[in-house]
Amino acid sequence: MSVVGMELLIYESAYRRMREALGADVAVRVQDDGSLRRGDAAVEAEDLALDAAYAAPGMFGGGGAKAFFRALLKSSTARWFHSGAAGLDDPVFPRIAAKGIAMTVNDAAAVGMAEYVLSEVLALFQRRDERRRLQAAREWKKVNFREVTGSTWLVIGFGAIGQAVAVRAKAFGAEVLAIRNDPSKGGPADEVAAPDALPRLLPRADVVVIATPLTDATRDMVDAEFLVMVKDGSVLVNVGRGSIVDEDALLAALGAGRLGHAILDVFRTEPLPAESPFWSHPKVSMTSHTSALGSGFLGRSDALFLDNLRRFRAGETLRNQVTL
């Protein structure tokens, strides 16, 4: 069924970015204070006749997020929800799915996250911090470094993000192994295997990249048993979710010297508490859940939503549709 005019729930800042592209659609805009506006007038969630909703990047955790999801969950007419995030581990998502609302997710972060992974691994391999210290000290000293060429990478989670990492690592001459639930789907790796292949593949990997969603199967996946299997001196990168890693086991593995270094963008508790040992650990490079925030992220996110909006209007198959 095609849809000509429709009512769309959208965050104010996203509406401003896309006002012209949205055309004749009726936009109900969620404000930072949680109020809803249709045109110049305030409106209550109970008075909406929503067809679709777009939870744009930047909305999650903001002042209007609760109002957005409250309005969507109250709706008896909404038929499509597009998330500006890639993950579906928030408890609100099963509640949306239970209403029979079609759900699509965002893969626009893959480019920036893959570049983040390559940048952080290259900085470690190239000993960039040591080079800058020598520069600051005006000390002329040669520094040997490790090449990515000839290294082996294991990417766990081979969706858009994992595949973007693989393409870039292979471009630098790395061998790439990958784990995905359905290995028959393949992808840009030298080998794609099912999760039960982890004991065979982990000991081969110089770099292990966690790019899988948080699910019951992946929660605490990187535990003491996992970390015993890793190659001596290997690097662990986590751009998935913090709860995939048992942080006590990770600290123990780093302290024992089994694991060479950890590059962490996500943590079990965010913001990371000031007393966390990760802030000052000599074998940890960390960032504040920012690996997705590349300069092209918002543009790609909005373009995907607008393409799906066109498809929704025309009754066509939606991109990145998921089921829970």
Image (cartoon, rainbow, N blue to C red):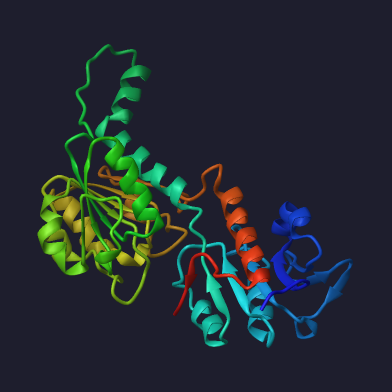
Residue at the spot 21% in from the left edge and 31% down from the top edge: 147
Q: Is residue 45 visible?
A: yes
**Quarter of the figure with residue 75:** bottom right
Residue 216, position as x, y percentages in the image: 32, 77
Residue 278, position as x, y percentages in the image: 33, 52
- Determine whether 56 is above or below 208 in the image: below
Q: Nearer the viewer, residue 159 or 271?
A: 159
**Quarter of the figure with residue 221:** bottom left
Quarter in which the N terminus is drawn: bottom right
- Determine whether 98 is above or below 291 in the image: below
Residue at the spot 27% in from the left edge and 41% down from the top edge: 170
Q: Is residue 301 left or right of residue 43?
A: left
Q: Which of 85 and 49 is in front in this view?
A: 49
Residue at the spot 76% in from the left edge and 82% down from the top edge: 49
Residue 177, position as x, y percentages in the image: 21, 52
Q: In this view, does 265 lie to the left or right of 173?
A: right
Q: Can residue 266 be seen in this view?
A: no
The number of callouts visible is 0
Residue at the spot 58% in from the left edge and 57% down from the top edge: 304
Q: Is residue 284 left or right of residue 177?
A: right
Quarter in which the C terminus is drawn: bottom left
Q: Which residue is outermost to the right?
A: 40
Q: Is residue 200 left or right of residue 307?
A: left
Residue 203, position as x, y percentages in the image: 11, 54
Q: Which of 279 and 90 is in front in this view?
A: 90
